[in-house]
Image: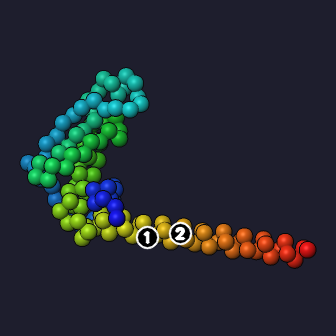
């Protein structure tokens, strides 16, 4: 079973709970990671907190503070939706469906490999 808050991705096609700006606390901080001076001198990393649930999101995906604000809100909205709706959340259902698809693909690949291995063994027996 996967932790609910890790299921949040970046899809906006879901029926998510709406966030109001009064419930949010926003900060701009210096980002971390590679980038040298460009990263070390600019406060374009957004830290967004949903006060009622206590969920915090940090976003430093682009060099633009505005884009980071938008992305942070999308991620936070999905996490808040998961927090309140749990397994009834569209985000959770999508993640489960994706995992199921991935497992099915793995199973088929394994079956194919077994078939090829079996075929190769049969061909070697025919040569003898």
Q: Position of residue 31 (x, y in %)?
A: 31, 32
Residue 74 can be seen, yes or no? no
* Residue linked to disc 2: 105
Quadrant where the N terminus sits is bottom left
Percent x, y of residue 14: 28, 65
- Element marked by disc 2: helix
| Label total for image | 2
Quarter of the picture containing the C terminus is bottom right
Q: Quadrant of residue 98?
A: bottom left
Which numbered disc covers residue 47?
none
Relative placement, left or right, of 106 versus 54 is right
Q: Quadrant of residue 5?
A: bottom left
Q: Viewer-proximal residue, 64 or 108?
A: 108
Q: Residue at x 8, y 48 (%)?
A: 22
Q: Residue furthest left?
A: 22
* Residue occupying the point 80% across, 76% down: 122
Q: For mark 1, give the secondary structure.
A: helix
- The residue that mark 1 highlights is 100
Crowd rating for badge 2 (residues with CA inside 10 Å; few <14, some 14–19, many 20+): few
Q: Position of residue 83 (x, y in %)?
A: 20, 59
Q: Is residue 1 left or right of residue 108?
A: left
Q: Is 115 rendered above or below residue 83?
A: below
**Dividing the picture into quarters, in which one does residue 34 lie?**
top left
Residue at 14%, 53% in the rendered image: 53
Distance from label 2 to label 1 (Cα)?
9 Å
Q: Residue at x 54, y 67 (%)?
A: 106
């Amino acid at each position: 079973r996967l932790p609910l808050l890790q299921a949040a991705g970046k899809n906006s096609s879901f029926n998510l709970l709406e966030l109001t700006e009064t419930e949010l606390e926003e900060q701009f901080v210096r980002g971390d990671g590679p980038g040298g001076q460009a990263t070390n001198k600019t406060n374009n990393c957004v830290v967004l907190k949903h006060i009622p649930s206590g969920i915090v999101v940090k976003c430093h995906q682009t060099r633009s503070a505005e884009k980071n604000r938008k992305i942070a809100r999308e991620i936070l909205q999905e996490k808040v939706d998961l927090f309140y709706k749990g397994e009834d959340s569209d985000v959770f259902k999508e993640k489960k469906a994706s995992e199921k698809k991935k497992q099915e693909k793995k199973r088929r690949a394994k079956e194919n490999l077994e078939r090829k291995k079996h075929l190769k063994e049969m061909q070697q027996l025919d040569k003898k």
